[in-house]
Image (cartoon, rainbow, N blue to C red):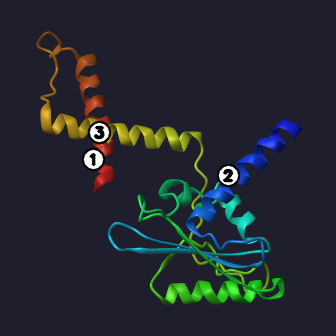
Amino acid sequence: MNYQSIRQAKAIEQNNKKRLLEVNPKLDEESGIYFLTRIDENGFKYAYIGQAVHILTRLAQHLVGYQHIDLSLKKHKLYSKSNPCGWKIGFLHFPKSELDKQEQHYIKAYADYGYQLRNKTSGSQGEGKAQIDDYKPSKGYRDGIQQGRKNLAKELSHIAEKHLKIEIREDKRCNKVSQKQYEKFMDLLKVGESDEQ
């Protein structure tokens, strides 16, 4: 990594720290447990509980990462008056020696309070760590292409059903190639329909 890249990364980190401090001005670099919570438009409560040796820096890392919670932060953004369904930030200070125990305690507590957890494990960096949510397999290029086809088929099927009449042209009705192409087109539309059921 060259000097320019390091400078740019540090500038992004500082900007993200400012954004975080706008949500919770009391955030600092001490060790502890942090709480990301949000309530969506339908009243569903979500939470992510994490531990950090340097809370503010760890939260800033979430804003540029690609883990499950990082992507949710990018999608739903941070809480503000104009974004009341965004992620709020809370924290409690604990010494490093207590982080594993406290993280597990608060993950369980938030689950008991009815929050849908965005944590993948029960917390801890060592002993007692257990998986609590399924890991989604990483999506590859082919998965993206396949999903794109399904989305397009669903959209075309909807448009055709509501607004179009699809049939073989009069001059091609007895043409076997045209009939096969018609069947192929209709099968493509069914990909979107079967996904909705």
Helix, strand or loop at disc 1? helix
- Of the numbered discs 2 and 1, the one sitting upstream in the chain is 2
Give residue 165's mark. none
As drawn, the label of residue 15 is 2
| Observer able to see residue 2 | no
The quarter holding residue 186 reads: top left
Residue at the spot 65% in from the left edge and 58% down from the top edge? 18
Residue 77 image offset from top left, x and y in percent? 51, 57
For this orientation, the residue located farthest to the top is 171
Q: Nearer the viewer, mark 2 or mark 1?
A: 2
Q: Is residue 154 above or below residue 26?
A: above
Q: Which one is earlier in the sequence, the residue at label 3 or at label 2?
A: 2
- Position of residue 106 measured from the top left corner of the image (x, y, whole percent): 61, 86
User: Which numbered disc covers residue 193?
Assistant: 1
Q: Residue at label 3?
A: 155
Residue 154 percent across, percent down from the top left? 30, 42
Q: Where 169 sits versus 79, above or below?
A: above
Q: Could you say which is closer to the camera, residue 123 or residue 98?
A: 98
First of labels 1, 3 by sequence position: 3
- Residue displayed at 34% across by 66% down: 41
The nearer-to-camera label among 1 and 3 is: 3
Give me the residue at 49% from left, 64% from top.
Answer: 79
Q: Residue at x 50, y 90 (%)?
A: 112
Q: CA distance from mark 2 to mark 1?
A: 45 Å
Corner quadrant of residue 124: bottom right
In which quadrant of the rendered image does the C terminus lie? Answer: bottom left
Q: Residues within 10 Å of mark 2 (few under 14, many from 20)?
A: few
Left or right side of 122 for 155? left
